[in-house]
Amino acid sequence: MKKINHELFGEIVHDLYWSGQQKITIFGQVKIVSLTIDGEEDDLIPKIQEEAYKKFITNINKLTKEAEQAIFEYYKEEYMEYRDMAGDESADEIAPIITTIQELGKLVEPVGLIILPDFEDGIRRVGLIFNCTWEEDGVGVKFENEQVVEVGYQDIVI
């Protein structure tokens, strides 16, 4: 395990991937989440990953608002199926009927910011992952070049 103090990411440790911590504000709450940077221990972190992080952090307030809206839209499309699976006793706990993003904030908890690998195509990729009440595997929001491109199970960004 290797530990470094990176000029951009701060203190990060390599154990299969680089990891550290990141403060974000989302759903009206300030949270410390894991920061994950895909990469090899002995290689430099590719410039595209550094650029992806810089641009994400520079626009973090706007991008977290877009993530909130994207998860809200995703939830509105999916929650009835989860209610049906949960049954009468736990439907309101697992997948309640909600009408606002603020209500959604009670159902999700941010757990990670992921700087996705460099696929050598010039696209900056970042993911946010969340635990949530309705899906045991959580939910993820994938950004490409600071635009939400996908919302779904966490595996879209891990």
Image: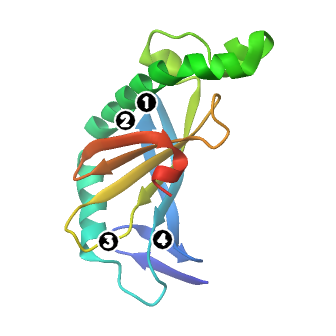
- N-terminal of the two: label 1 or label 4? 4
Distance from the alpha carbon under mark 2 to that under mark 3: 22 Å
Which mark sits nearer the N-terminus, 3 or 4? 4
Q: Is residue 27 above or below residue 42?
A: above
Kindly give the residue lying farthest to the left in the view shown: 122
**Between marks 2 and 3 in the image, the one whose residue lies nearer the viewer:** 3
Question: 23 or 82: which is nearer to us?
Answer: 82
Element on which disc 4 rests: strand
Compute the Cα span from label 3 to label 4: 21 Å
Return the mark for residue 157. Answer: none
Task: State the residue position of label 1.
Answer: 71
Residue depth check, mark 1 versus mark 4: number of the one nearer the observer: 1
* For residue 113, above or below residue 20: above
Q: On the image, numbered disc 3 is attached to which residue?
A: 118
Mark 4–mark 2 Cα distance, whole angstroms, equals: 26 Å
The residue pinned by badge 2 equals 67
| Label 1 crowd bin: few (<14), some (14–19), many (20+), radius 10 Å | many
Image location (x, y in percent) of residue 56: 28, 51
Q: Quickly name the residue at label 4.
A: 11
SS at badge 1:
helix
Question: Badges 2 and 3: C-beta atoms under 8 Å apart?
Answer: no
Which amino acid does the dot numbered 2 rest on? Ala
Kindly identify the amino acid type of the residue bearing the numbered disc 4: Glu
Q: How was this image coloured?
A: rainbow
Q: Find residue 125 and report its horizontal and vertical position in percent.
A: 31, 58
